[in-house]
Structures are given as C-alpha cells and as structure tokens.
Amino acid sequence: MHSTSQASHHDHGPSLRQRLAARGLDAVTLLVLPAALFLVLLFIYPFAFGLVLSFEPKAGGSWLANYSRFFADPFLYETIAKTLWLSIPTTLLNLFLAVPIAFRVRLMRNQRILTAILILPITLGTVLVAEGLLNYLGPQGWLNRTLVTFGLASQPLKLLHNYWGVFISLLLTGFPFTFLLTLSYVTGIDPALEQAAATLGAGARQRFRHVYLPLLMPGFAITFCLSFVQAFSVFPSAVLLGAPAGPTRVISIAAYQAAFEEYDYSMASAIAMIMGFVQLAIVVAILASRGLFYRGPASGAKG
C-alpha cells in the first residue's frame, strides 16, 4: 500500500508551482509583472507606435520621406544644433556650479534647510519660473529698473525673448536636480580617503584632483546625462522666454508645429524619433567615456 502511494506520487511529478519556481518564476518574481505591464503600456508601446508612424508619410511616397524632408530643410535640421547649443552649456554650467556648493553643503549643520532652499525651483515648475523671469528680467522688471535707477545701465538689458532668457530659465530649473544628484555622490565618498591624502601632505586641490575627481566622474557622467536629457526636451521656456522662430526654435517646437499646426502626425513622430536618437547618442558617448577616468567598482569609495 505504501509503495503504491509512492509510485502514484512519483507519476504525478512536481507541482506547477514547483516547476515555475525551478525556472525562476516564484511568487516574488511574479510581483514584477504589473510593473512590466505598466512599462510596456506607458513607454514601449507608444515608442513602437511612433516609430512605425514615422515611416508612414502623410503625403505618401518613400518610407523615409519624413526623414529626408527633415534633413533637407535647414529650418528643420538646424533645430538640432540650436537645442544642443542650449542644453549642453546649461548642463555643464549647472554641474560646474553644483560641485563646489555640494562640497560646502555637506559640511554644514543646517544642510536640510539650505538644500530645501536650493531645490525650491523644482516645486515651482517651468511655467511659473518663466512667468517670474518675465516679471524680474523684463524691460520694466525689477532688475532693469534697479540698473537704470542707479546708473549701472543706460537702457534696459534685453534678457528675454532671446537665447539668454531660455538659458537662464534652464539654469534655474535644472540646477536643483543637478545639485541633488551631485550632493548624493559627494556625501557618499568615505571621508577617510581625504584624511589619508591630507596626512600624506596633499593640498585641497590635490585631494580634489587625485582623490575625489576620479571617484566622482562616473557619478558626474550619470548626472550630466540625466540633466542633459531634461534640458534637451525644453519647450515652455523656449516659447515663453525665447524666440520660437529664431535662435530658440528648438526641436521640440518643430515637433509641436508638425503635429498641431500642420496636423502631420507622421512627421511629428519622425522628429520625435530624431530627437530621441540625438539624446541617446550623447548619453551613450558620455557613459562610454566613464572608464577613461575610473575603472574601479562603483561603490568602492562609499562610506
């Protein structure tokens, strides 16, 4: 009787749950499925739909007609250079400003209060920042009134509806994001490394150059990429504070005009694909260059 039950059990074999677990599909792994489905519905499907749509020109013709039209028209392809000319300098300047401030803030007792003040522009949003700049930097704004009143300028400075208006806006809205990422990397380095370098006679500049900089470069690369992608997708600032038909006609404006002025969603999708490819190329180039500065483990200097 006992041997019969053993044979019966052997015939049935492992249960379905056991077979799934053997393949790595246990109960914990299945919890990832909702997130994966959300990712597919929100990101992958729209991207795939837009990619296919970009190869279906509204006027017909070759499947590459939209891309040929974009790169044949200077009014369209020059938007790439104009967007890069805004996004790369602002990203570099934000990173350049965030580093010394992060090193200073990490030593302060009231770090949370100062950090909250520095990240305030995030809570305001791009549109509110743009409206504030219109009031402060406009011809009758507080800055120009002060300069003219005290004789520091003979006439109001033109800081809006040009390149500089968008540049300043991107600095204000991008700095908090860059600063928070930089601060997290700076505070994550073990202070014992700096102390050891100081004990060996290294000055402040030498400690930064030979200790901190090699360890921070991978983090700086990631910070640059994330901040660059944010700046490259600029749209409200370019419209409200720039010259949408001139030096601040960024690629997002070209996509908007194709979709909502020309009602050519196929062309708009092609511009969006080009926009994504340019961002991807910059990000891949930056991330690939990280190994030139530091080849150790990413967490090797964490305290």
Image (spheres, grey):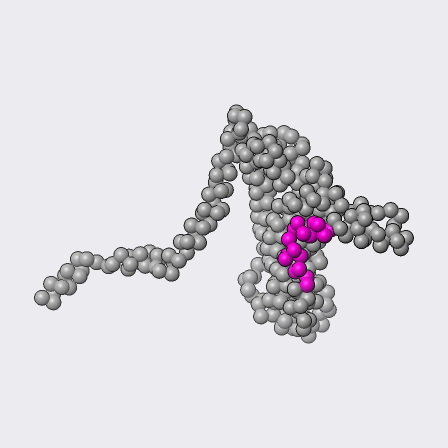
Name the spot of residue 39 as percent of width and height, x first: 46, 50
Dominant secondary structure of the magenta stretch?
Answer: helix
**Horizontally, is 40 left or right of 193 in the view?**
left
Outermost residue to the left? 1
Q: Nearer the viewer, residue 22 or 121?
A: 121
- The residue at the point 62 percent across, 45 percent down is 233
Residue 169 visible in image? no
Name the spot of residue 106 as percent of width and height, x first: 66, 68
In terms of image quadrants, where is residue 68?
top right
In terms of image quadrants, where is residue 258?
top right
Looking at the rendering, the stretch of residues picked out in magenta corresponds to 117-133
- The residue at the point 68 percent across, 46 percent down is 237
For the N terminus, which image quadrant?
bottom left
Q: Nearer the viewer, residue 56 or 99?
A: 56
Q: Nearer the viewer, residue 218 or 170?
A: 170
| Rendered view: 97 above or below 60 | below
Name the spot of residue 67 as percent of width and height, x first: 57, 32
Residue 288 visible in image? yes
For the C terminus, which image quadrant?
bottom right
- The residue at the point 47 percent across, 45 percent down is 44
- The residue at the point 63 percent across, 57 percent down is 123
Q: Nearer the viewer, residue 251 or 103?
A: 251
Check residue 123 for magenta coloring: yes
| Rendered view: 126 above or below 26 | above
Total count of labels: 0
**Horizontally, is 95 left or right of 266 in the view?**
right
Name the spot of residue 219 as percent of width and height, x first: 60, 58
Check residue 143 for magenta coloring: no
